[in-house]
Structures are given as C-alpha cells and as structure tokens.
Amino acid sequence: MTLLAVPFRGRLLAPFTAALMLGLPFAGQADTAFQYDLPAIAPEVASETEEKPGWATQRFAVAAANPLATDAGYQVLKAGGSAIDAAIAVQMVLNLVEPQSSGIGGGAFLVYFDGEEVVTFDGREVAPAAVDGELFLDEQGEPLDFLDAAASGLSVGVPGTLRMLEMAHKQHGELPWAELFAPAIQLAEEGFTVSPRLATSLAGEERLRQDPQAGPFYYPDDEPLEAGETLRNPALAAILREIAENGSSALHTGDIANDLVIRVQGHQERGGTLSLEDLASHEAKQRAPICTPWRTFEVCGFPPPSSGHLTVMQILGILEHLPAVEAPLEDGVPSEAWLHGFLDASRLAFADRGKYIGDPAFVEAPGGDWTSMLEPDYLAKRAELIGEQSLGNGGAEPGNPGELSTAWGLHPAQPEYGTSHISIIDEQGNALAMTTTIEQAFGSRIMADGGTGLAGGYLLNNELTDFSFTPQDAEGNPIANRVEPGKRPRSSMSPTLVFDRDSGDLVASLGSPGGAAIIHYTAKSLVAMLDWGLDAQEALELPHAITLGGPAFLEAGGYPAATLEALNARGHDASERELVSGLQALRVTDDGFFGGADPRREGVVMGD
C-alpha cells in the first residue's frame, strides 16, 4: 500500500494521524486492518432541498446523513470491515459533524441481518432510578412547557448507543474496535468544515447558547458558526480515544461518567437525578424482531419500546383492506384518493399507538403478544371505519386488538423530534438499518467535555421527554408510556429491513429521522418502492403527508392546491408545513444495489 498525504483546504495532512494517536500500527505493517484517509473534499451542499441522482453500486453500499460519515463507513467496508464495523465509524463521525441529531450521548435501535437471521439491538436510553411519574409536572401539578423540560437536566436519560454498538460488534465485528474510531478522532483533531445544515441549526437555536460548554464552542463572540468555517473538537477527540481503548465502560464509568453526572445534576435551571450508578448499570438488549408479511414481502422492524414497526405495519395493513385506488400517483405525486386512505389509516394506527405501546418490561402487550395489533382480521375491522369522509381531527378511537389486564389511558399529544438514520449492506450480504438519536435538535442543550477541560465535547439527550408528561389520564387510568424508574421511553424510530417472502432474500434497508413522522415517511417509502415500483431515490423524493391523529399536514410546495382542497372537502383539516425527513434507503438490484438519500438533507450513498 502506498501512503500519500491528502490535500485538505490548502495544506497537507498525514492521512493516518488517527492510527498513530491510537497507538495503532501504520504504513505497511501487515496486521493493520484499517487505515483512514482524510477526504480531500468536505461536504458543501445546500441547506435546503437538493436534487440527488441515486447511486448504483455492485459490492457494498452505505447511506448516511452526512458525506463525511458516509465516507468513513465506505472506507471501513473497503478495508474488509463488516456492516457493524462501518456503522460504528459512521456513528462516531455523525457525533462530530451532525451533533444536533445523534451521538454517544443518546440512544439507537439497530436491525441486523447476518445472512441467515434477523436480530435487533436495543440501545435506547433508560430513565434514572430516582425519577417518578411527576418528573415533568410543575408545582401546581401541570405539565411543564416542552422546551423548559427538554432543555434541562430533567430530560437526560442514561445513554445507550455505545453499549449497543459494543454488543453488536462483539458478535458481528471484523475489524478491531479501536480502529473504527480513527476517522472521527482525526476529523475532530484536524477539523472539519461546518455544513450548511449544522450552521442553519445553530442559527435557529437559542437555548444552546446558554450552556457554559456549548455556548462558547458553537457561538464564538456570541455569533453562531457559519457554513464553511473549520471546527475542531479536541474534547471529543480525547473522549473517543478513551472509548477506543477501553470500550463503552469509558463513558459509563470513571472521569467521563463523573463529568456527565455533574452536568446533569448541576444544570443551572432544572437539575436531573441521573447518577453514576445509573450509568454503570445500563445494559444494551438484544431483542427478537417483528417480521410482518406484506404483499410478497416480509418486513422486519423493531419491537417495543419502539412504536415504529407496529404503527407502520398497521397503516400498511389497513390500506390493504381498503378498495384499491385506481391512480395512487397523479403527475408524479401521491393522489388525493390515496392520501385519504393513508391519512385515516394513520389516524387509526396512531390511536392504538397512543394507548397500548410502551416499554415491554413495564407494559403488557394486548392479548399478550404485540403482533395481535397486526392480525389481518383486526386490521380489516379497523379499515371498515374509513369511508368517503375522513375520520377527521381526533375522530379515530383506539381499537381492541386483545384483552388487557390493565386499562390504559390515552397518551396526550406531545412533540417528538430526532434523529439520524444509517443503512448499510456489506460485501458478505450482511445488512443493517440503524436509527440513532439524541431526540430534539441539540438534545438537552447540555454539552459534556468528559472532564478534559478542553473545548467541545458531545451533547446529552433529552430522551425522557418521549415519556408522557402526565402519568394518568383524566379518568385516572395509567398511561402506558408514563415515566417510571429504569424504563425505556417509547420511540417512533423505524429501522426496517425487507425480504422476499418466498426466497428469503434481502430486498431493502431503510429508515428516517423525523420524530413521530418517521412512521409516515417509512410507510410511504415502502409503498413507493415495493408497491408502486419507484427506485430508492424516486421514492425518497415524493412529498410527504402526515397526521398524528389530529389535523393533516402536507409538505409545503409538494402538492397541487387542488389536492389540499379535496382533502379538506373530505374533512381532513389539512394544511401545509415544512416536513423535513432524512430518509436513507438501499434497494437490492440484479446488479448489486441502488441507494437513495433524502434531498431534504445532506446525506449521500457510497459503495463499490
């Protein structure tokens, strides 16, 4: 192998500095599995919608939300790493270049196919042992304002991403754990170009400025960093070195953990209860996926505490029981006739979601089995509720998919945010879909430097605001997704793998950020790719339409005015708004793979 210096903004950098910093062998030593080359071109893409071509590859493919992160995964796969190896490298770089969305201070769900079976890895955050159901109530017993709760120590759950990735790597990794951190460490040390999306997010954020660590780092001279500036993060580089050497325990015990606890408990307005014991005791979980027949496919997704797969497949299952729409696409976008069924199916599915789904360690599944919510007979009865006129704003009630020993109350409407998605297929045919989050943009707005005293660091999640702020409904019924010690908050993340039902062959990997709207983005993309025959890029470019049970929202500028008018004539209470997804999708083709990246974000697909 010939080692070359790489041009980087007008100067030369040694490409393997990170390996040296980690004490790894370098330059021609036979036992070196992976060497990272700093990309010569940093991402310079629009902060608004950008046309993307879709990408065809033959041997392997990786799709992620930022070109530097995608490139890190590509280099790992090129070096013979597994899909899991690549996901670790991608996540660490995302922590650096897209800190508002995900990182080691948050959690993730991963669906993995090893060529024979599908497994899921649960790295969801956990509520501290000292919380109770009144965590987000004020002195008068009223729910706190969402942002007051989120931007505080109260909202921080025990992070789980690193524990999960470590568990998956021990089972399915090929390259050494430490080497997978080299890209993020080198980029953190040498600097990366602030992307338009990060700059836009910083400019629109106020509470992050108030954090004593994040404020000076992201707002030098009290002004947000601008796109094109070079940003270095020495604190994160030092933290990642520790994790590379000592594994996830470096975050969950010792100096880095102590710093995290101090920042959560010592928050200037509302300190949380997260403790060293909470951090040390966190465990990732391996769970059985839920694989659901649909059309000629088997769709595999994440079980509770995610509501994603169950709700996506309820929507698709209800649609199957409605009369076929003659023209689901009109002039290249979903038609009013198709949207009518999709939106009301979403209302029905979200009604069930709000009543039944929570952490399975605390919440009993209807009838003792979550798949009772997907039984064809049950979904057929739900579909009968959809007529020519919409169920309307709040008109969908939960169904009764199976007997319960406890009567749950209805989850109140609350904002949900997030996240980032990664899809990877390696050369051996192993595949993953991983959705990762710190919840709202910039999470709890608390930055931790790991006790290093250096500039920068990583952001902590606000994941506990995914719980219901109120523990019971007006009738006194407990809410399934209420706050309880040691509980994992319900999520909408929907990492999805699709297989051919007859052959068992892999068909696709996909997912998206977007809070509760992740469910709609994923469901529509599945229909577009696998029912309407669009390729991955075409499917991701379709305009969105969502409802969380109340009004309907159509993506601004995406539909003809006549579509909005026709939906409102049916009672949908529809209006336009910005709907910024971040879909990534890989579709298996006869020649290899074809990948798509959402035009609304900075993601790309790479592969050979």
Image (spheres, rainbow, N blue to C red):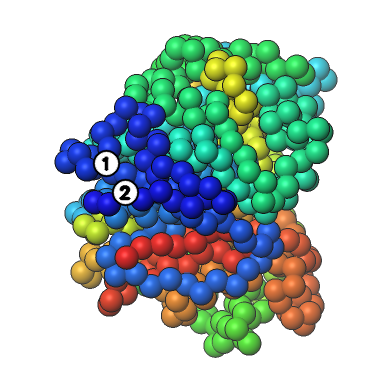
- Disc ID at residue 226: none
Whole-percent x, y for residue 555 in the image: 70, 67
Give 155 or 589, whichever is nearer the viewer. 589
Give 125 or 438, whichever is nearer the viewer. 438
Say whether residue 262 is left or right of residue 425. right
* On-image quarter of the C terminus: bottom left
At mark 1, the secondary structure is loop
Report the number of discs.
2
Looking at the image, can residue 372 be seen? Answer: no
Contact check, label 1 and label 2, Cβ < 8 Å = yes
Q: Answer above or below: position of 503 versus 255.
A: below
- Disc ID at residue 3: 2
* Residue at the spot 20% in from the left edge and 39% down from the top edge: 29
Tell me the quarter of the picture where residue 209 sits. Answer: top right
Q: Answer above or below: position of 354 versus 498.
A: above
Give 494 or 246, whichever is nearer the viewer. 246
Query: Please, which residue is most extreme toward the left here?
Result: 30
Tell me the quarter of the picture where residue 598 sits. Answer: bottom right
Q: Residues within 10 Å of mark 2 (few under 14, many from 20)?
A: few
Identify which amino acid the numbered label 2 is placed on.
Answer: Leu
Give 552 or 62, whichever is nearer the viewer. 62
Identify which amino acid the numbered label 1 is placed on.
Answer: Ala
Whole-percent x, y for residue 440 in the image: 65, 40
Reading the image, the residue beneath label 1 is 27
